[in-house]
Amino acid sequence: MRSRLVSGLTVPLVPPSLDTRLAILERLAAARDLKLGHPVLRAIAEGIRGSVRELIGTLVHLEMVSRTEGSPLDMDHVRDYLQQRSASRPARVRDIAAATARHFALRVAELRSPSRRRAVVRARGVAMYLTRRLTEESLEQIGHYFGGRDHTTVLHGCRKNRGSDAVGAGRPQGGAFNLNNTFYPPFVAAK
């Protein structure tokens, strides 16, 4: 049985190289009938080092902005987009834990401790819920950060705190919604 499971073909997945990203962007631009210069495509390829989906998403976003504004897609659009993208870094577990601890007037050490005090358990559950929503961490990784807890404990905390009403109960300005806005401000319509 083991030999059948082990005998599969393994293929390492690596991000595409700069030349590959550039070729992908050239073909995509041609398919979408976009007239883009080589410097613009190169700037996008150098700025986006992730997956092919990120490249496609970036080009589609830039195309949409360009068509909405009625102006050609140029280096200024690309620079603005890349600066905006680098400014919005993803949330990290320790940032979420620190914001949650501040919100509930606790210390991060208390969230990571084995304490079962109601206030600590509630705050820890909110922190686990937000970490699950705002990061790519697995249940095991979240549990490990919050004091070596089991993945089922993290799942319970996430389910219990899923709705912002449950999280904000008994706290006038509280809840996961307000903490969530700490990392991702609410949408404000442009004038």
Image (cartoon, grey):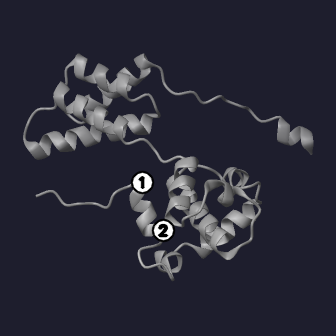
| Residue 148 percent across, percent down from the top left | 77, 54
Q: Nearer the viewer, residue 166 or 75?
A: 166
* Element on which disc 2 rests: helix
Residue 35 seen in render: no
- Residue 129 found in image quarter: bottom right
Callout 1 environment at 10 Å: few (<14), some (14 to 19), or many (20+)? some
Quarter of the image where the N terminus is located: top right
Which of the two discs, 2 and 1, labels the residue nearer the N terminus?
A: 2
| Residue 187 percent across, percent down from the top left | 28, 60
* Element on which disc 1 rests: helix
Gap between marks 2 and 1 measured at Cα: 11 Å
In the image, residue 77 sits, relative to residue 179, either above or below, namely above
Residue beneath the point at 16% across and 32% down: 73
Residue beneath the point at 13% across and 42% down: 67
Residue beneath the point at 48% across and 77% down: 168
Mark 1 lies on residue: 183
Left or right of 22? Residue 153 is right
Left or right of 33? Residue 162 is right
Q: Nearer the viewer, residue 178 or 42?
A: 178
Q: Nearer the viewer, residue 191 or 179?
A: 179
In the image, residue 20 sits, relative to residue 62, either above or below, namely above
Residue beneath the point at 65% across and 52% down: 138
In the image, residue 53 sits, relative to residue 46, either above or below, namely below
Mark 2 lies on residue: 176
Residue 183 seen in render: yes
Q: Amino acid at mark 1?
A: Phe
Q: Amino acid at mark 2?
A: Ala
